[in-house]
Amino acid sequence: MAEAALEEPRAALRTFLTSREGLWHDGDENLVRGLLEGWAGAEADRPAAVAARLLAAGQELVKMGARREAWWFYLWEMESLLALVAGQGRC
């Protein structure tokens, strides 16, 4: 049920981001991945933990005045985590 509700927004986001994929660089990817993947432990993949990690990473990007390309990569990563947050597992 939750997966079906996400399909249309996910498709729209993928379309938007695919056209921008070549604009971000390794620095943007490393920054975002560092913020998102800094968690470990048994609880790290629980939906609430993933949602908290996404929010914390977004707050850090705001604080540092991240480039728009870093935000696009953040959205790229967020899209890949949406199914996990919805309880459907990572896709």
Image (cartoon, rainbow, N blue to C red):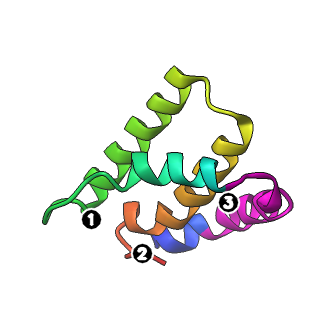
Q: Mark 2 points at which residue?
A: 90
Q: Residue at x 47, y 63 (%)?
A: 81
Q: Which of 77 and 1 is in front in this view?
A: 77
Front position among marks 2 and 3: 2
Q: Which amino acid does label 2 sit on?
A: Arg
Q: Badge 3 is on which residue?
A: 9
Residue under the point 72% across and 44% down: 69
Q: Residue under circle 1?
A: 45
Is there a contact, CB below 8 Å, between mark 2 and mark 3?
no
Residue extending farthest to the left is 42
The residues colored magenta run 7-25
Horizontal relation, residue 4 to residue 43: left or right: right
Residue at position x 26%, y 52% from top? 49
Measure the C-alpha gap from mark 3 to mark 1.
Answer: 22 Å
Q: Residue furthest right?
A: 19
User: Element under label 1?
Assistant: loop
Q: Picture quarter containing residue 88?
A: bottom left
User: Residue at the spot x=62%, y=31% of the render?
Assistant: 66
Q: Is mark 2 on a helix, strand or loop?
A: loop
Give yes or no for contact between labels 1 and 2 (Cβ–Cβ under 8 Å): yes
**Which tag, 1 or 2, sits closer to the chain's start?**
1
Is the residue marked by circle 2 packed among few (<14), some (14-19), or many (20+) residues within 10 Å? few
From this view, report whether residue 2 is shown above or below residue 59.
below
